[in-house]
Image (cartoon, grey):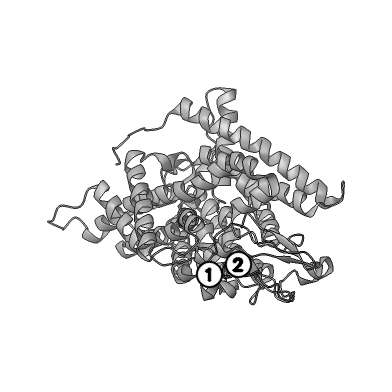
Amino acid sequence: MGDVNEIGSNKAVSVGTTPPISAPPSQFHSPSLSRSPLLASDDHIQPANKTPRISTPRFVTPLGTPIRRALQLTRLDPHDAWLPITESRNGNAYYAAFHTLCSGIGIQALVLPVAFTILGWTWGIIPLTLAFIWQLYTLYLLVQLHESTETGMRYSRYMQLCSATFGEKLAKWLALFPIMYLSGGTCVVLIIIGGQTCKMFFDVICGGTCTAEPPTIVEWFLIFTSAAVLLSQLPNLNSIAGVSLIGAITAFGYCTLIWVVSVIEGRTEGVTYNPVRGSTEVTRIFDVFNTLGIVSFAFRGHNLILEIQATMPSDEKHPSSVPMWKGVKIAYTLVAMCLFPLAIGGYWAYGQRIPENRGMLTALFVFHGKDTSQFILGLTSLFVIINALSSFQIYGMPTFDGMESVYVKKKKKALPWWFPAILRAMFGYGCFFVAVAIPFLASLAGLVGGIALPVTLVYPCFMWLKVKKPKAFTPIWCLNWVLGLLGMALSGVLVAAGIYVIIDTGVEVSFFDPR
């Protein structure tokens, strides 16, 4: 929705050379600001030798009052009806809760106890609590910024809001790479984790009694990817609401199972809670900042909030921000019920012995693989696999939308049914190739957390200041400036710390050799 023209009710309309756009019937009720929007006349098919008629304005948008005062109309982007994020506008608060919970809890939550091994009890709980409150506040800002009271637009994608706020060139420099990683990079990590967990699930079910030769780890990656690609053929974001519900249930399930079993089994033998200290002062400082990057990475997912809200209808009396915020509150209540017990209970049970690779999931199998029911172990593994498949769909959707938008904007018509299937299969198997080529990507959580931190904690603050323009030195003005500047400084330090820790301690680099 980048090129939007506002047409005054008393201005003449000239016919340009832009070819007519044949919008489907769903365009007139689905991807707009309202349930019954008013399209500018040149969005319809017009005979070449006739001047388009200008109909009497009907102010029916959710921003009707300010637009009515300004006597302006907002022209719709006809491409939205053909793109997977905005094709369907039938979402509600429950759908929003499903999507938000599915994207808000993931495998990254299982490594939170690793941060406690460096920070200790007090300084582990404090950053975790502050990060949770901070990211919940920036989520609220994004929900409120989804609809502009100035232009009457809905910003249905994170990059659209960035471009409208900072300018297209600056937005690409600031946000394009983190958003691309949070979409495509997360899908790669999900293939790595999903494939490895498939192998663990097979070993639990087989129990050492199977005579058949098990698939290799690369073959497990391929099996998981093929299932994810098959599931990705669902057409739009609203259509995967059921998938997100299953993903949310399984995420809550395996987080709860892991920390409950760990606490019931009790502390492992020889557990200690003394923070791990580096050999030098510089190493200790950078270790602390790297663990803060792990904590911040646990709260990724803000790059999907505007997209989730875009699936909802909106009108003057029922703006989409109301059900969206309701869904967010439901989702993050459950997120808190998962992350805090998982981090605190996991560190209590394993202390300094918590494995760095996949954290709590690996710890469950290493320390309690023999004294825990095979049913519990198998169910936990199955939940992780199902959640990874579900999360793949919602994190891949922005990439699907971006690829399909290239065709739609060029041809000005919907894609043929087979074209999205090919594009999504190419994306899925492309992620599979990267997962096999760089299987250690999941171990870079601290560095990635620093790179992605501005998308979650910084940019919403600056976008609020630019769009809403609060009066200088008011509490809300001061709060957003402090959080924005603090977040930018923290992001730079976290990236430097992540690079230093990788250089100092090393990462088991194994290109094209997943294990």
Q: Can I make out residue 176 in this image?
A: yes
Residue type, numbered disc 2 = Asp
- Is label 1 in contact with label 2 (beta carbons under 8 Å)? yes
Kindly identify which numbered label has been placed on residue 43: 2
Crowd band around label 1 with a 10 angstrom C-alpha radius: few (<14), some (14–19), many (20+):
some
Residue 399, compared with residue 284, is above or below; it is below
Where in the figure is residue 214, as x and y percent of width and height?
19, 53
Residue 178 sits in quarter: top right
Identity of the residue furthest to the front in this view = 49
What element does badge 2 sit on?
Answer: helix
Q: Report whether 167 appears left or right of 218.
A: right
387 vs 320, nearest the viewer = 320
The residue wearing badge 1 is 23
Q: Report whether 110 appears left or right of 432.
A: right
| Quarter of the C terminus within the rendering | top left
What element does badge 1 sit on?
Answer: loop
| Quarter of the N terminus within the rendering | bottom right
Residue type, numbered disc 1 = Ala
Where in the figure is residue 128, as x and y percent of width and height?
61, 49
Q: Across the whole image, how many numbered discs are drawn on residues?
A: 2
Inter-mark Cα distance, 1 to 2: 8 Å
Q: Residue at x 32, y 52 (%)?
A: 195
